[in-house]
Amino acid sequence: MDTLLLIPSSMAKRPCPSQNPRPPNHLNLPDRDHLLETFLDFSDSPPFAIDLSFERILDSRDSDADQTKLIDRALQLGSVLLEAGKRSARRRASKHNSIAWALPPDLTIKVFSMLDTQSLCYAAATCSMFNKCAMDPSCYANIDLTTVVPKVNNAVVSTMIHRAGKALQSLKLGVVVPGPTTSLGSCQPLVYTIRNSVDVSNFSWNDKRSRQGKESSILSRSCLSPLGGDSGAPGALLRKLHLYNIERMDNASLCGALAACPSLIDLEIVGLHVELRQTLVSVSTNCHLIERLFFESSKSGRDDSLKSPACIELVNNCPHVTSLSLRGFKLHDYKVRILIKGFRKLKYVDFSTSYSITGSFLRNLGSNTGGNLLEVVILRDCMHLKVAEVYRLLNAVLSGDFKLLRHLDISNREGLASEGDWYYERCYSLSVNPLKQVLEQRPHLCILAEFPSEGSFADSDQMFDSEPYSDISLPSQMSTHTSDGSMFVSFSESSYNSDHGSGNEDALDASYVLYEESSDENALMGREQLYEMQLNCRGHN
Amino acid sequence: MSRVFKLKSSDNETFEVEEAAALLSETIKSSSSTEITVPNVKAEILGKVVEWCNKHAESEDTKDQLIKEWDAEFVSVDQHVLFKLITAADYLQIKELVDQLTQRVGDMIKAKTLKTVEMTYPTFNVEREVQEELKSLGF
């Protein structure tokens, strides 16, 4: 039997078919290697030679058990050889790469740290040398796992965060609407709403691992839990956190994540089902270094949760805020005023698509109280924004307030609210007078005031004049609205009693009273100016 | 009077560089001599590095649009040359040049225009699931 195994060239013949072959353990290494070498030579024979040989051997075994054993052995050996071949191929490729890739590891890591997360993962998947470089924490300092359709799951997030470790500086996560967004106050809503048409069926391989079935390809509420943990956790040094349309995220998990990020400077939350008040409370509790807050509601004006105490707490605990965007919430003027006056360093505000605010929060702001550093004010599509307040603001600019203002956006798809019925009487243009003067006096100030031209209200039953209106209209006769002094008398009392649409009539807290006292002299001055204003409003004939 | 530095390439060609340009290199800055030999860097490459330094010593304002365009042109070289430039800039410790060049390599990886076998040779299986997941996402 032993002699058989020592004659490699006659492996096709078996003089003792009933005997099982014994592994050549007794052979020394060179002989064993020679054996394998010869076998490998065998495989160069004409096609199917090994097949036929194997079948002949199989046939020569009588017992079923013997045959099964032989087949198993063949499979096993085949697999071993396959793995050995693959390993060697990889090693050769790596060696080739290290010759062909002319950069040392530290420079390779530097290159990789400039890649976006997606390209980084591709690079890591190509070869072991790249993989090693791509695992360096510095490559994961800025993790961007945003996608156009829901794809990334918790495991991926967790892996990336752990790779970053202490190097983690920014994390972007969730589903974003594709397409360009303007840098200054995009009016395009970022909230992702098209869900049903998404095809997530190609992720079925996840089913094998997950206990939740197909849905595990979506981020769950605990997707940010890797940020927290014991001391030295990745969240501790995180500076930027942007979250978009994560369906399953809730108040508790978001607040938990914020609690893990005391160094946060930039927080952007779009389309999450979280309450504004709770989120802001969590920010003011945990993120005292915060400079930029960008929140866009998932509920289009129905989130009315913001309360004054939360505003006060926020401005007290987070003095470094320079940029504040609250879009799509129900905000009241007096609460917004707390924020604007309280944030001493505030430069950029965006309250687009807000409900309830009329713009009165901007009164008496720009001189030397808080708000005088404002550079950008964006109030796009605020349903209750009053044209009167806009004029008041423009006059304040003319009289020297808001010295640093360089961008003002009051565009509105539905026009601005007038003093009358806020719903039916909309203003679609601003008159020339204060606007032209402002633009002359302040050439660097950019004012965006895009309104629809007449006739764009398809479902309204207003009567329209046939005369077309443009953005800057010509002065016509004085409207009865301005000659009615009630607008100014109402300065000292709530001026929104008749305007139940905005809901500001309950604005009787301390901060509102304060502002009233100082505004009386302005009221007198303002009255003259406003009398001269030409107000072009749509109204019933 | 500004000093003049002499940079010698590996194939024995000498480049004269004004002080302002030369001091963009940390290596030269911390060198005691004004004659520096740059090993493993041929004249062709060293010449380009000197060109970059001269350009950047001239214009103070690096945010200038013109210089940005010039820089973009400068790094749009053959991959072969690009890697050699990185090595040279790295040796001379010219941070901004290294940044620009590595950024370019990164851009090429992103655009998948990098001509190396390894970029199309998927041989590694570690954490395959994560990689596959991301790749299958078209990510």
Image: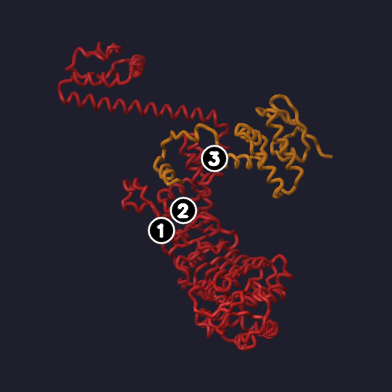
Chain colours: A red, B orange
Classify mark 3: helix, strand or loop: helix
Q: Is residue B80 left or right of residue A248?
A: right
Residue beneath label 1, please? A195
Q: Is residue A406 left or right of residue A338?
A: right
Q: Please, is residue A446 above or below residue A156 in the view?
A: below
Residue A378 in percent (x, y) is at 59, 68
Q: Please, is residue B40 above or below residue A340 in the view?
A: above
- Residue A308 shows up from this direction: no
Q: CA distance from mark 2 to mark 3?
A: 22 Å
Q: CA distance from mark 1 to mark 2?
A: 11 Å
Classify mark 2: helix, strand or loop: loop
Disc 1: CA contacts within 10 A as few (<14), some (14-19) or many (>=20): few
- Does the residue at mark 1 contact the one at mark 2 (Cβ under 8 Å)? no
Q: Chain of mark 1?
A: A
Sequence-wise, the earlier of marks 1 and 2 is 2
Residue beneath label 3, please? B109
Disc 2: CA contacts within 10 A as few (<14), some (14-19) or many (>=20): few
Out of A231 and A27, give the one closest to the viewer. A27
- Residue A37 shows up from this direction: yes
Q: Please, is residue A157 above or below residue A286 in the view?
A: above
Classify mark 1: helix, strand or loop: loop
Residue beneath label 2, please? A148
Determine the image quadrant of residue A531. bottom right
Residue at left offset 69%, top offset 36%: B27
The label shown at residue B49 is none
